[in-house]
Amino acid sequence: MGEMRQEPTAPTQDDGAATTAKRSGPKTPAKPGKGRRALVWALVVVASLITFASILTLWVDRQMVDSDNWNQASKQLIQDPAVQSALSVYLVNQLYDNVDVEQALAQRLPPGLQALAGPAAGALRQPATNAVGVILQRPRVQQAWLTASSLAHDKLINVLENKTGNGVSTGNGVVSLDLTALVAELGLDLGIPKSALDRLPPDAGQVTVLKSDQLSAAQSGFQVLNALSLWLLVLVLVMYGLAIYLARGFRRRTLRNIGWAFVVVGLLTIIVRRLLGNYVIDAVAAPGYEIVGHHSWLIGTSILGEIGRSVILYGLVAMLGAVLAGPTRLATGLRRRLAPTLNEQPEIAWGAVGGAYLLLVLWGGTHALRHWWGIILLGGLLALGVVALRRQTLEEAAAAEAEPATAPSSRAAAVGARFGARGKERSPADEIATLNDLRASGAISEEEYERGKELALR
């Protein structure tokens, strides 16, 4: 018993500190000050507002400048039933306003039936309107529409970029969509002689896109948007990156907040697209053309809707990453399952992430995934996420390994100190009974119980 009282020693303050450090695992950073938290929040909020402005500039840039997107929207327009119906009425009106249909039909009728040309011209007007819908479905006619739309787009871009020598200037010209070929196509189907259609006035079938007094303002606005479309995006990325860098000690929450900000901005973009469309169409659409105006708006702003949905997707991915790195039971259990593969077989983990990355690139579901800069940015973010997750699982694994190694020794030292203080008044039976109580309560393990019992019997 004398040996038993001398062998165990109470843990010193340094030993207790070392044990506590081992149990706590990675060193916890100091609590960030209120000023730094406020700065991070300010960066996130301002960056989110700039993100919304950047989305609008990106939409204008991609819809107005990109010829492929313009032609795709034009193709969707000519294939939309509401647009075809409105275009049918317009083309028939243009034909009847610029061609003497009655005289043209009279030339095709025998002398005895020429008196019927007037009633026939009137009777043909409504059937002709209905027939245009069929005509507009012909590939040749749709190609004529696309050609006219493409020429109008080229002319518009030349004007907005202030290029000379294209037949349009800010002082004396207009940008128009030339549908004369479609008017002539309709006239031929109605039996109007080609000689009469060749005399169509130059302004027949001309749809004005921009008037001369609007071109100068459009040029200025276009140049501003063209410059901002790139630099606003760069500024947003820099501000979000700075916010995450400054958020030491609460980076996971900052990443989660940025994810929420993306989701809110994306939803706001989709809502504004609808509300602004309703306002614009109600303000500028002619009576009876509200439906075709709404259809045209939705087609023309489809890229804006795509950007909004993409931003929501990016936000959800950021939030998912923040949750995966969080302290919840689900996240902790998932990291525990992933840890062996990440830490012991990293080639498998990198292979799985690389395969998923290639599938995303092949899918190309967002605009960024269809361009080299977006592909590189996504690859870098995925790699950074894997490195951060692997580092976190390594720290958690080290803390878990240190826990069973230090806990028994510290508790055994505490038991030994207790025996050393009371050994002179207590018998081995009393000490073993105390050990039994500690084991029953879960304060010590079976191994610690056996060690204490051995000490008590010496």
Image (tube, rainbow, N blue to C red):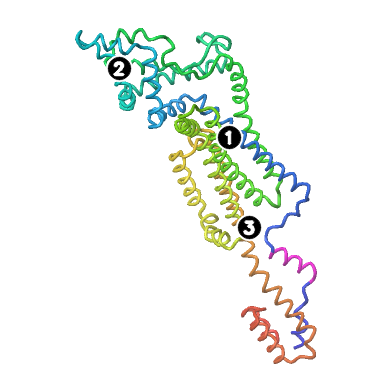
Q: What is the distance, in whole Å, between disc 1 and disc 3 at their CAs?
A: 39 Å
Q: Amino acid at mark 1?
A: Ile
Secondary structure under tag 1 reads helix
In the rendered image of this protein, does residue 378 appear above or below residue 432? above
Q: Give the percent coordinates (x, y) of residue 421.
A: 80, 83
Asked if the magenta segment contains residue 21, the reply would be: yes
Q: Nearer the viewer, mark 2 or mark 1?
A: 2
Q: Residues within 10 Å of mark 3 (few under 14, many from 20)?
A: some
Q: Which residue is mark 2?
A: 121
Q: Amino acid at mark 3?
A: Glu
In the image, the segment drawn in magenta is 12-23
Q: Nearer the viewer, mark 2 or mark 3?
A: 2
Q: Which residue is mark 1?
A: 55
Q: Is residue 440 left or right of residue 284?
A: right
Q: Quadrant of residue 358?
A: top left
Residue located 35% across and 12% down the image:
99
Q: Which residue is mark 3?
A: 395
Residue located 65% across and 36% down the image:
50
Q: Give the percent coordinates (x, y) of residue 429.
A: 70, 92
Q: What is the distance, in whole Å, between disc 2 and disc 1 at their CAs?
A: 51 Å
Q: Amino acid at mark 2?
A: Ala
Image quadrant occupied by the C terminus: bottom right
Q: Earlier in the sequence, mark 2 or mark 3?
A: 2
Q: Earlier in the sequence, mark 1 or mark 3?
A: 1
Secondary structure under tag 2 reads helix
Question: Does residue 375 appear anywhere in the picture?
Answer: no
Image quadrant occupied by the N terminus: bottom right
- Choose between 288 and 260: the one closer to the eye: 288
Q: Is residue 368 left or right of residue 443?
A: left
Q: Is residue 188 left or right of residue 439?
A: left
Residue located 25% across and 14% down the image:
116
